[in-house]
Amino acid sequence: MLEKHPAIKGIFVTYHETATGVVNNLEQLGNLTKNTDRLLIADCISGMIVQQFHLDEWGVDCAVASSQKGFLLPPGLSFVALSNKAKEAVEHSNIPKYYWDYRKYLNYFYNKAEQPFTPAISIVVALKAALRQLLAKGLPQIIEDKQSIRKYAEDKFKELGFTLFIEDESIRGNVLVPVIVPKDIDGSKLTALIDERYDFTVAGGMGIYAGRMLRVGIIGEITEREIDLLIEYIKEVLPECKK
């Protein structure tokens, strides 16, 4: 596609997709854009912290993350990392913009150590505490722990008769565990009953997988105990969810 369309200036990709739980290979895409004028722009909102990520090594030019998900905070802050190639593109960009003009942010950052617009101060303060906690544990340990809890949850759901949505282990993310409910079970009723009776919220599938999939989040302070509780609750309501 890049050879056929030489005018393409960049590739937009989601690192981890929460609708499916799939992790895309940024390194392979980076190999297509390295040593070219094209930019690789990655949505890392859910993939950051709990997945391996290497901006420079993989050739990512712009990575966007947010305070929710792996940073253990409510939504309200966005984080952007730019490569030198991306910074050059920012300087030459003539698309009309105001709020999204990164030149403003870079200028304020380098000259005033602040932002051009009022940020969510309370979440900035919370971010300092969250980062202290994350760094104390260390990213390698966090990633290892999340891989462990993911595999634990996968095994528990397979024992219940659920099917893993992603067959290929290499593209399974450490953010959530997507599973397909048994054919004789109403997935929508299942999630509704768990929420109503036990105050546990489990996301259902989207699009064609609505009512057929569960997406079990494992980021934050989710441990094997929470997974065990969820499995116990599912066992209790399954008989009522028969089609």
Image (cartoon, helix red, strand yellow):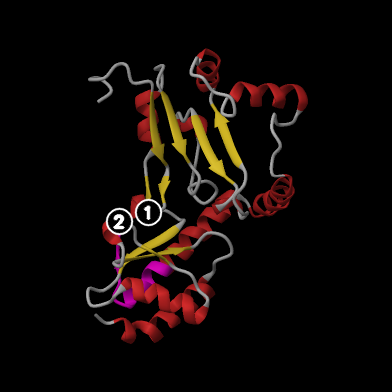
Residue at horizontal 35%, vertical 34%? Answer: 28
> Residue 145 location, x and y as percent?
53, 60
The correct choice, above or below, for 162 with respect to 11 in the image is below
- How many C-alpha atoms fall within 10 Å of the one at disc 1: few (<14), some, or many (≥20)? some
Q: Amino acid at mark 1?
A: Ala
The correct choice, above or below, for 93 with respect to 63 in the image is above
Instruction: Residue 233: name its quadrant.
Output: bottom left
Residue at horizontal 49%, vertical 45%? Answer: 52
- Which residue range is magenta in the image? 153-167
The correct choice, above or below, for 14 with respect to 114 in the image is below
Residue 29: assigned label:
none
Q: Residue furthest right?
A: 112
Is label 2 in a helix, a strand or a loop?
Answer: helix
Residue at horizontal 51%, vertical 22%? Answer: 86
Question: Is residue 125 rendered to the left or right of residue 18?
Answer: right
Question: Is residue 102 rendered to the left or right of residue 95?
Answer: right
Q: Amino acid at mark 2?
A: Gly
Q: Which residue is mark 2?
A: 207
Instruction: Residue 40: name its quadrant.
Output: top left
Counting the numbered discs, the total is: 2
> Residue 141 location, x and y as percent?
57, 55
> Residue 51 location, x and y as percent?
48, 48
Q: Which residue is mark 1?
A: 19
Whether residue 158 appears in magenta in the rendering, the answer is yes
**Marks 1 and 2: CB-CB under 8 Å?**
yes
> Residue 4 location, x and y as percent?
22, 20
Q: Quadrant of the C terminus?
A: bottom left
- How many C-alpha atoms fall within 10 Å of the one at disc 2: few (<14), some, or many (≥20)? few
Q: Nearer the viewer, residue 57 or 67?
A: 67
